[in-house]
Image (cartoon, grey):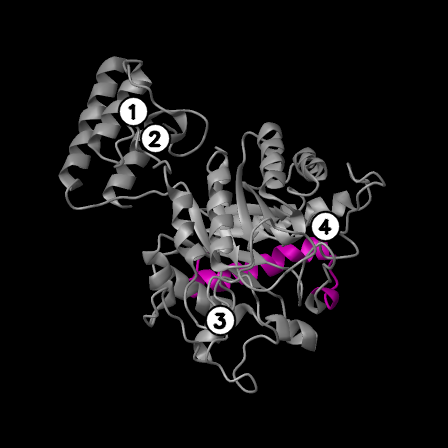
Amino acid sequence: MSKMNRFIQIKGWVIGMSLFHLFTFSPLHAQKYVGGDISLLSTYEEHGANYMDKDGKKITDLLAFLKEQGLNTMRVRLFVDPSKASTEAKGQGVRQDLEYVKKLGKKIKDAGLNFMLDFHYSDTWADPGQQTLPQEFMMVNTPAFEYIYTYTKVSLEALVAAGATPDFIQTGNEISFGMLWDGCKVSANSEWNAYLDTNWDSFSTALKNAARACREVCPEAKIILHTEQCANNPTLDVAFFKRIKDNEVDYDIIGTSYYPYYKGPISNLDKGLTQLEDNFPDKQIMIVETGCGYHYKMGNKETGYPLTYEGQRQFTADLITMLNKHQHVNGLFWWFLEANEYGLDWSTKRVTDGWYNASLFDNETGRALPALYELKNFRSGETLVGDVNGNGIVDAEDITDTVDYIMGLSAKDIKKETIDVNNDGIVNVADIVAISDIILGS
């Protein structure tokens, strides 16, 4: 049988199958992910928090409401044993153990949302200033950079069994200076433009072992490496990911934090993202944490926006406008968007020991803020994988165009990112089957 006849046969079979199911399924395959870290939602709901929309109408199901506003992914942090955290940290919201995350993760998945898991690999906050080795890791006769595999695998297996399979997995939180200190702590040089060699072998091994567990238990999940230097020191951020590449660490997405009240104006982030894109064109980038105040001053830098509802909304709109100019940026997440102490008795029902004044609900009224309604605009113009002809749907015509593209018969302007469905760098029959799976809803 000739190659041409074989392609025609494949084309006829796949198109026929697709047309048969075309009116049964309504496929969507989002290429942009927007949402927030809602790690305290379960506690707020248990304490009876009063969530309302912008008009004061009571919200009975916050996840359903967020989905209605165009959000499609929620992030939750996981501590090893938060019962061992300090009283201060617990008062700031450290409580997400595995049982807690299993329940909230399942709730997110049941709501039809994507679930991003944020491993802290600590009993308390993990960030540039602290990456404290969890007590569990101290109690085993295995180096932390090896035991991380066991801990990650066991945790993921428990989540999968609970119906809370993550779609995205952060193997560490804000790890610009390593994690599991001191053995996996890395440091910048005196000029803060490169890294010293100390501990890079152990740190890289830890990340490789964490990634290995992720691939084994959640093979469909995307692995995120999360740093926080992009906006304030992009040179060091690029140096970090070059080290990661040189050490052959397995991951999919570059994640970064950006808070204007710590990192400065949006233009700083814009420049940093450009440097990451120029140096790592094969990687997607997500802003996995952001936020901006609406009432009280936060941080040590001026944001350039007034501390009002409108100021927060304008920041969000301007941030999205900038991000949507970056082809590789496919994720935006607002940190602690669910913070809302309205109506809770401060003595007996408060969730945290201090208001978080950059949430997307007003602590004094319980109402959703205008910035929340802006977030959906991050998804404007998003590409649908498999939407080869760019008409906004994935259907049998896209299969026809893909076959024509493979055979060299297509005269259409087709973007490779929409046609290389399995993202392996080539376009072949496997992509035809993948498009068919999208149509069939599988």
Read off the residue under disc 2.
431
Left/right placement of residue 125 relative to residue 388 reads right
Left/right placement of residue 368 relative to residue 140 reads left
Q: Is residue 377 above or below residue 344?
A: above
Q: Secondary structure at mark 1?
A: helix
Amino acid type of disc 2? Asp
Rounded to the nearest whole Å, what is the CA distance between mark 1 and mark 3? 49 Å
125 within the magenta span: no
Counting residues from the N terminus, which is met first, the one under dot 4 or under dot 2? 4
Q: Is residue 23 above or below residue 305?
A: above
The residue closer to the viewer here, 357 or 326, is 357
Read off the residue under disc 4.
178
Residue 76, how many percent across, how many down? 51, 61
Q: Secondary structure at mark 4?
A: loop
Q: Which mark is residue 402?
A: 1
- Magenta segment range? 137-166
Task: Give neighbour class at mark 3: few <14, some 14-19, many 20+ (Cα, 10 Å).
Answer: many
Q: Are marks 1 and 3 in contact (CB under 8 Å)?
A: no
Residue 69, how many percent across, how many down? 35, 55
Q: Which residue appears farthest toward the right when viewing the image?
A: 190
